[in-house]
Image (cartoon, rainbow, N blue to C red):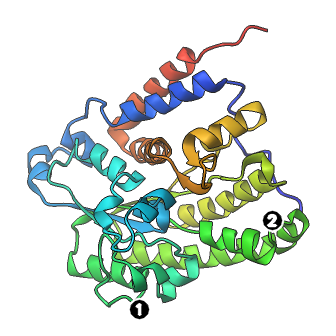
Amino acid sequence: MVFRSGSRRAIGHWGLAALLAAAIVVLLYVLLPAPSAAAFDGHGRGDHAQRTPQTYLALGDSLAFGYSQKRFEENLPLESPSAFETGYVNDFAQALRLFRPNLQVVNDGCPGETTESMIKGPCEYQLAYPLHHPYVGGPASSQLSDALAYLAANPGRVKTITIDIGANDALGVVEKVCTFKAACILEHAPALFEEVGRNLGLILGDLRGAAPHARIVVLGLYNPFGSTLEGANQLTERLNEVMADAAAAVQAGFADPLPLFNPGGAQEGPTICLLTNMCTAKPDIHPTDLGYKVLAGVILQQYLAELPRYHGWMHGYVRRLEHARPHHAH
């Protein structure tokens, strides 16, 4: 098949300094002056909204969990979940607490999760190590079943759901089936897209049915291999399109990290080194702490864009950032 590339947003030749500036902006997102709770909720019951207990439900794989290989090795053999509190879930929750100081976070993320194991279980990591939120059905149960059980037991309390899933499906093809051979990856790509689209559609459909009024944001994928793996950016882009379509089908938002993690050209390598652990002594596809903050910023931007009274402010803020970008002399 031919991968589509026309839809990918061009980042331009910012240079590394500009990328660092963009990352700093993401950090500032967490510290931005918050609109009123009324604006956040889209109605005028701000005081009541502040007092009402609400929950942010985070679903996903190792990214939701906040995993890094270095931290895992440092914390053997116990692997307390408290050692993994610098992921995007924590950063995004910090931003939400500007509006909801009493926000509760339920993080169901499980390292190694695929779209299929999320539905059927088990997540193998939980069979050996504890999670942030152990599943009510036990270690052999599925993450989706735990999420649905929590939503059923707490009707109306979950206002925000994020989910990242599908990276391990792709890695299974890239690493295990094809051992990084580009032609093989291209051959297996259609089946991968079909599987992720079908499973993610089922997962999101169940979540939307259980939480019809929650804001759901699906986090897309980045390519940790950069330009070292032929066609990987195009594969990731196409998989993100599949995921975005599944999100749109249930009125969920889609946050795309690919343009920030993989700007292409001369900046591809330095960016991967900055935002992932691929350039460390023991290369690791997972984000650095800064990379996790960038993921949180991408989610936050998508989340805020869906708030009716925040949209105009957000649009103006992004326009000011556009004008503030450094320009290269030609």
Foreground residue, 206 or 163? 163
Q: Residue at x 56, y 16 (%)?
A: 323
Callout 1 secondary element: loop
- Badge number at residue 140: 1
Q: Residue at x 41, y 44 (%)?
A: 300
Q: Residue at x 28, y 62 (%)?
A: 82
Above or below for 96 versus 36: below
Indicate left or right for 266 with 288 as reference. Answer: right
What's the residue type where badge 1 is placed?
Ala
Callout 2 secondary element: loop
Q: Quadrant of the C terminus?
A: top right
Above or below for 123 versus 311: below
> Which residue position is annotated with label 2?
180
- Residue 256's x, y, as percent? 58, 49
Q: Quadrant of the N terminus?
A: bottom right
Q: CA distance from mark 1 to mark 2?
A: 31 Å
Disc 2 crowd rating (10 Å Cα; few below 14, some 14-19, many 20+) is some
Foreground residue, 81 or 8? 81
Foreground residue, 31 or 227? 227
Indicate left or right for 142 with 282 as reference. Answer: left
- Residue 118's x, y, as percent? 49, 80
Looking at the image, is mark 1 or mark 2 earlier in the sequence? 1
Disc 1 crowd rating (10 Å Cα; few below 14, some 14-19, many 20+) is some
Foreground residue, 152 or 271? 271
Residue 221 appears in view: no
What's the residue type where badge 2 is placed?
Phe
Residue 248 appears in view: yes
- Residue 113's x, y, as percent? 52, 75
Above or below for 190 versus 254: below
Indicate left or right for 263 with 180 as reference. Answer: left
Q: Quadrant of residue 244?
A: bottom right
